[in-house]
């Protein structure tokens, strides 16, 4: 929103809204399971919809495009130890906690959720999540 005030006539500002991969999609579904000693990063974040609303309140007319953004998870659901380690690290990043410390059933449910959201395309297993591109022109 600060950039909106700094754009000269004819200028363009663009913002891509995304957090740790998957946080936005998994946050409401799984957050109640976790005991955190510090607030979740999501609590302090701004969503693309909040950004659009704020820009409109400033009198701007932003445009938002939702872009399907894939991450290649090919092989990460295999039983090999390396695949399990990489998947655990990815999910730790996505959820902003140590995935391997969760109870086994919670880990299984989260893995099933992520695997169920994947699509096979050209021999790859892709996990798509929407990311917002917000354009502001003056």
Image (cartoon, rainbow, N blue to C red):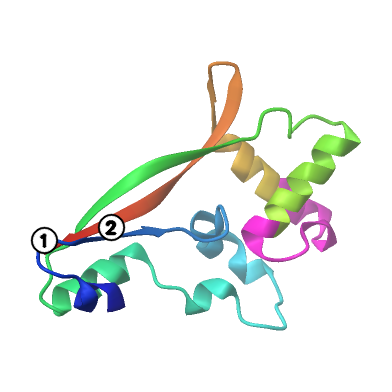
The residue at 13%/70% (across/down) is 60
Q: Name the residue carrying label 2.
A: 134
Q: Is residue 106 magenta?
A: yes
Residue furthest to the top in view is 122
Left or right of 91 on screen, residue 45: left
Residue 131 seen: yes
Which quarter of the image is occupied by the C terminus? Answer: bottom left
Q: Is residue 94 magenta?
A: yes
Q: Which residues are magenta?
A: 93-108
Which quarter of the image is occupied by the N terminus? Answer: bottom left
Can you say whether 37 is above or below 104 in the image?
Answer: below
Residue 68 at x, y percent in the picture: 40, 40
Could you say which quadrant of the image residue 67 lies in?
A: top left
Left or right of 23 on screen, residue 60: left
Numbered circle sitting on residue 90: none
SS of the residue at dot 1? loop
Numbered circle sitting on residue 10: 1
Lower position in the chain sequence, tag 2 or tag 1: 1
């Amino acid at each position: 929103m600060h950039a909106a005030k700094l754009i000269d006539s004819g200028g363009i500002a663009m913002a891509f809204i995304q957090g740790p991969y998957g946080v936005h999609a998994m946050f409401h579904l799984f957050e109640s399971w976790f005991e955190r000693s510090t607030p979740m990063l999501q609590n302090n974040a701004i969503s693309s919809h909040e950004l659009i609303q704020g820009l409109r309140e400033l009198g701007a007319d932003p445009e938002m495009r939702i872009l399907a953004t894939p991450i290649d998870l090919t092989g990460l659901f295999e039983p090999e130890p390396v695949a399990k380690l990489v998947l655990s690290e990815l999910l730790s990043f996505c959820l902003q906690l140590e995935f391997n410390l969760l109870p086994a059933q919670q880990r299984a449910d989260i893995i099933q959720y992520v695997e169920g959201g994947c699509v096979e395309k050209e021999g790859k297993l892709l996990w798509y999540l929407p990311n917002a591109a917000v354009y502001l022109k003056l």
